[in-house]
DNA sequence: ACCTGAACACCGTTCAAGT
DNA sequence: ACCTGAACACCGTTCAAGT
């Protein structure tokens, strides 16, 4: 990574500005030149903070990760994982254009800190390392998958979330001769008051309960009642 | 959508070529001009198939969806959902560069057909519409989330998947003065023979079992033993 | 040494000139 | 009417000219 500029613009300021642009215009709307314009700086000055746009995107992912996964002190492993799940979902539903950043394949430095904290909590709860790693993967996966599907089916309109709007629109706008979809139409009345909150909660709780109950703990440890 | 070209190049051929490019070089490596070059056609001829690159990406997502979610005839609702989950994961681990396409926010036309089929199966199993929609969302979410996390932690190297390689590399390359991560290091020996298959299977089976057991069915219906 | 404007090799898309 | 080359307004990045 390039050295930080000595000039007036901190790396954090640049990254936060970039996140704002992505939030507003989508990932495709982010350009190095446009970002520089936004910041009132000549384009090349930004390269003090990254070597390439690709690296800028990695740094953005890192910054986003920091925002999605924060450590809640005094929380149990279940409390921490539940809180993080909700935080991820809340932030990403509020800023749907950040979702494409999640397909980056760098492990952000901040991730280690988060993992370390959760793993330690789980060891404290008696879980063996393998079980702990599995649990974290499963919870992370649940949260991100939920957001991805929710976004796919309801679009990017932020608040209020248009629940299943896209599916409704899709059914309504089918070409005239298209095959009928009676099963979907049976479910259509639900779409109005349908909420993804229920899916998310049900999934999260059964997952946490399942982990608590079924994952192996070290000898002598007993699950608290 | 633009009318199909009368020329020699079918829309399917264009989309398949584009998927190959994305698979090979990543989404960032796909350009209209480059694709035309690949196909030995002048760039503007491709616009017979889409109005803009944005629309091309939507069509690509649609084509990908068709590949990820196919209907397995003679399968029960559980069989269908399980088979689709595995198919999604298999395809996306084999072609990790396709993952960013999943962040598109159009509902592919093919999606309706898939939903219709699964919903009908679930009604046949006695589920009320609301429960059926919830179940499909949950299973989709599980599969996509699993792939996202798996990819995030192990990189895009296709076969053999480098399990938790990125996390290992991350720990190894920490700057010298960085805070120690004893909990992660305790888990490191597992990383060698760690497999995401187990996480995926455990999640999938508890999810399907949970749905089967807890979701409301219509009056008079009884879960088959 | 640092900073940055000019330049290069791209890109998506418009549009008018070709047939 | 269709097809498509040239042109336009961008883009990421190199590099040498400035300080």
Image (spheres, coloured by chain):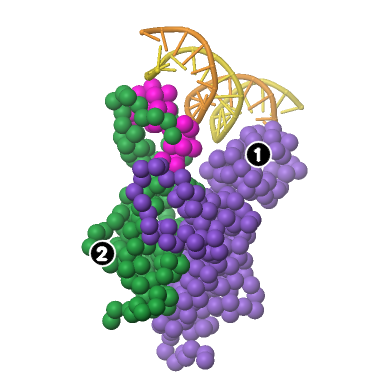
Chain colours: A purple, B green, C orange, D yellow
| Residue B222, position as x, y percentages in the image | 33, 80
Q: Chain of mark 2?
A: B
| Residue B179, position as x, y percentages in the image | 59, 67
Q: Look at mark 2 in the image and give the residue it sits on.
A: B75
The residue at 65%/75% (across/down) is A73
Distance Cα–Cα, label 2 vs label 1: 52 Å
Q: Chain of mark 1?
A: A
The residue at 23%/63% (across/down) is B74
A62 lies left or right of B59: right
| Residue B86, position as x, y percentages in the image | 32, 61
B84 lies left or right of A85: left
Q: Look at mark 1 in the image and give the residue it sits on.
A: A35
Q: Are marks 2 and 1 in contact (CB under 8 Å)?
A: no
Q: Which residues are magenta?
A: B35-60
Tag 1 secondary structure: helix
Residue A27 sits above or below residue A95 on the image: above
- Comparing A213 with B59, the one in front is B59
The residue at 46%/75% (across/down) is A207
- Nearer mark to the viewer, of 2 and 1: 2
| Residue A140, position as x, y percentages in the image | 49, 66
């Amino acid at each position: 990574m390039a050295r930080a500029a000595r000039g007036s613009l901190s790396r954090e300021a640049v990254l936060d500005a970039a996140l704002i642009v992505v939030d507003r215009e989508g990932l495709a709307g982010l350009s190095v030149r446009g970002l520089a314009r936004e910041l009132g700086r000549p384009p090349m000055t930004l390269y003090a903070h990254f070597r390439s746009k690709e690296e800028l995107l990695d740094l953005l992912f890192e910054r986003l990760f920091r925002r999605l996964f924060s450590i809640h002190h005094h929380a149990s492993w279940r409390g921490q994982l539940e809180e993080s799940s909700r935080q991820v979902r809340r932030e990403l539903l509020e800023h749907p254009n950040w979702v494409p950043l999640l397909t980056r394949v760098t492990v952000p430095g901040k991730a280690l800190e988060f993992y370390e904290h959760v793993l330690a909590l789980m060891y404290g709860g008696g879980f063996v390392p393998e079980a702990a790693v599995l649990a974290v993967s499963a919870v992370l996966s649940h949260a991100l998958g939920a957001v991805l599907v929710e976004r796919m089916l309801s679009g990017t309109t932020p608040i209020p979330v248009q629940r299943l709007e896209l599916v409704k629109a899709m059914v309504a706008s089918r070409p005239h001769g298209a095959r009928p979809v009676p099963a979907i139409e049976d479910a259509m009345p639900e779409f109005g008051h349908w909420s993804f909150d229920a899916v998310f909660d049900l999934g999260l709780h059964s997952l946490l309960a399942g982990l608590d109950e079924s994952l192996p703990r070290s000898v002598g440890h007993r699950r608290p009642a």
